[in-house]
Amino acid sequence: MNAPTRTAEAAALAAYADEAWDERIVPALTDYIAVPAKSPMFDAAWAELGLIDRVVRDAAAWVEGRRVAGLKLEVLRLPGRTPLIFFDIPATRAGSGDTVLLYGHLDKQPEFNGWRADLGPWTPKYEGGLLYGRGGADDGYAVYAAITAIEALDRQGIARPRCVGLIETSEESGSPDLPAYIDVLRPRLGQVGLVVCLDSGAGNYDQLWLTTSLRGMVSGVLKVEILTEGVHSGDASGLVPSSFRILRLVLDRLEDSKSGELLPESFHCAIPAARIVQAQATAAILGDEVWKRFPWACGADGGPALPTTTDPVQALLNRTWRPTLSVTGVDGFPELSNAGNVLRPYTAFKLSLRLPPLVDGNEASLRLKTLLEDNAPYNARVTFHPDGRAGALGASGWDAPELAPWLHGALDAASNAHFGAPVGFIGQGGTIPLMSMLAKGFPKAQMMVCGVLGPKSNAHGPNEFLHVPYGKRLTAAVAQVIAACP
């Protein structure tokens, strides 16, 4: 990484961000990580336990304690829905008409297993510039970094537009509660000119990365039932078809198990030429690290297991613009130590179908349900129950609008000032439902989607960490871009 080329203003923003992270943000996130505030999809008793409410109260108190001039903060609670923090900070630039909308979330993924012996999902540990624990990077830091970026500008007397914030608590469940809040808040959001979403990732820790696209997702439970109870496998096998084999046959309608390619054309879309060009440029920066960064197990020959492709360009496109299927959970199987000779009555898989950015998530969920359930082999009972609420059973992806010249210039200047390298462009394979909602509601808004989830940060998995030095530089860069917003 080259030395940053900073103006006096950029240096002041960086110094403020460094101090804020060391003295205020890292301690706040340490407390946040210790709270198992799992998203409602993973904790049906979230309301009774009050853990989501706790992290919301803590974050709201922290924000209000910063005493930003003119700041108004509310914790909104619609009946039957997770709470949302909304803050509104008036402009310091005379005549500024547009609003900057900043976004993050406080709900978390579940624990998962495989954590290092000295780490745990709810046991924060700060080591070598990395803050370990569930949710710090995805996405607890966002509200703290957003307020710090605004504070940095105000403390230096750098004029900026009006800023509002949406900090939700159902994102890891597909944001089922967010549309209702956006409907309520729409008259108060104003004319949104720039969205700053701090829930994305980075190709490396050496430059600012702008997310150019996000995949959509359909998730749900596929269940195959063939018996009402388990029976002796020696007595029934060969006559009663295995529920696992039936489920495998059903999945063959969806996926080529040899290649991993999704078979229905309706789950694919044409990749825009501009995104292919960007993938080629990003592949030139990252090279084989696109695929080498994953924690590969030992392969058949003693070397690492291999990816579906070692071509960096195709690897980038596979994880951002092509549909893929993952099985993320199972039911109907006993523990290995308790697995007797029994033909099991049912098999259930939790499916995660990632969709290209231009495929409608709700329509895809309906097509998937029909594909899996119709004409069941052996007349078995086959059901697919997609996650989400009626009318929003899948999350749509997002393809960024064309960058306005002012934003492209501001991003490049901020990246050079705080990282010593130009801005990079990368698609992400994850899903942020808010982005497609805002793209429809504010079609003229520019989008700065970025985040701290760089190589090996492992959000959702074991040993998740937040790269604090990157967080500091990102915060200063966000401040600089906000100041450049017309």
Image: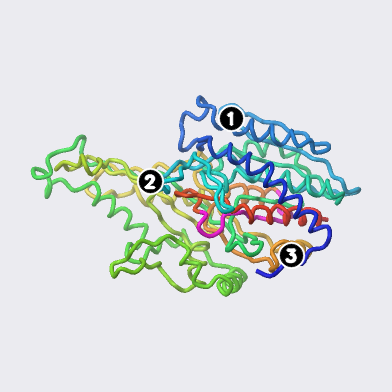
Mark 1 vs mark 2: give the one in front: 1
Find disc 2 in the rendering and name its residue: 350
Tell me the residue at 44%/62% (across/down): 265
Say left or right for 16 vs 82. Answer: right
Q: Nearer the viewer, residue 332 or 288?
A: 288
The image shows residue 354 at horizontal and vertical percentages of: 47, 55
Q: Secondary structure at mark 1?
A: helix
Say left or right for 30 vs 87. Answer: left
The image shows residue 361 at horizontal and vertical percentages of: 52, 50
Dot placed on the residue nearer the N-terminal end, 3 or 1: 1
Mark 3 vs mark 2: give the one in front: 3
Q: CA distance from mark 3 to mark 1?
A: 38 Å
Find disc 1 in the rendering and name its residue: 53
Query: What amino acid type is highlighted by mark number 2?
Result: Lys
Query: What amino acid type is highlighted by mark number 3?
Result: His
Query: What amino acid type is highlighted by mark number 1?
Result: Asp
* Magenta highlight range: 442-457
Tell me the residue at 49%/39% (across/down): 122
